[in-house]
Amino acid sequence: MLSYALITFTVGRFVATGIATFLSSDFILVVYAVAASALTAYVSVGKGGGAVGALIAIFFFLAPMYPTIFTLGTEGLGHHTRRGAGILVMGVSGGAVFPPIQGAIADAKGTRISYVVPMIGLIFVLG
């Protein structure tokens, strides 16, 4: 299943790059975040093959998130761009914080409901 998810991630990155030639980065980020949030919500309540398919499809929509957020976050910083980029890179702590939280929720309440944790992060991207 991981192989399919990573292939989906790669395809999502290339598709988003192609779309970025004629749509703005912030619009792409919003559309992809809404789609990923909806799929994550479905994974939280769905069952069977549909939920597994949605879980794999989430990777498609997560693919352009980091580069798009990085680009938007460093835009217009002028001579502070290098410092701003460094702060953005150092600020990537979600990979260290959220998996243990999701794991604790999965252990206590179940794996499906634990997908509320990444959904909160995706909603934060929309804010």
Image (spheres, rainbow, N blue to C red):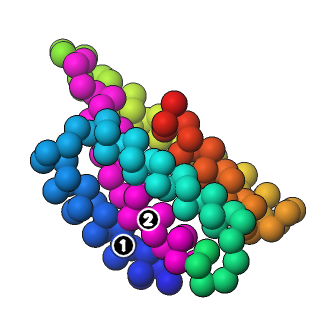
Mark 1 = which residue? 8
The answer to whether residue 81 is above or below residue 89 is above
> What's the distance in space between the residues labelled 2 and 1, CA to CA?
6 Å
Question: Which residue is situated farthest in the right direction here?
Answer: 108
Q: Residue at x 34, y 76 (%)?
A: 7
From the viewer's perspective, tell me whether residue 4 is left or right of residue 100.
left
Q: Are marks 2 and 1 in contact (CB under 8 Å)?
A: yes
The answer to whether residue 100 is above or below residue 23 is below
Residue at disc 2, secondary structure: helix
Magenta-highlighted residues? 52-77
Q: Residues within 10 Å of mark 2 (few under 14, many from 20)?
A: many
> What is the chief secondary structure element of the magenta stretch?
helix
Residue at disc 1, secondary structure: helix
Residue 117 x, y percent position in the rendering: 67, 51
**Viewer-nearest residue: 89 or 117:** 117
Q: Which mark is residue 22?
A: none
Q: Residue at x 16, y 56 (%)?
A: 18
Q: Earlier in the sequence, mark 2 or mark 1?
A: 1
Mark 2 = which residue? 59
Residue type at mark 1: give it: Thr
Residue type at mark 2: give it: Phe
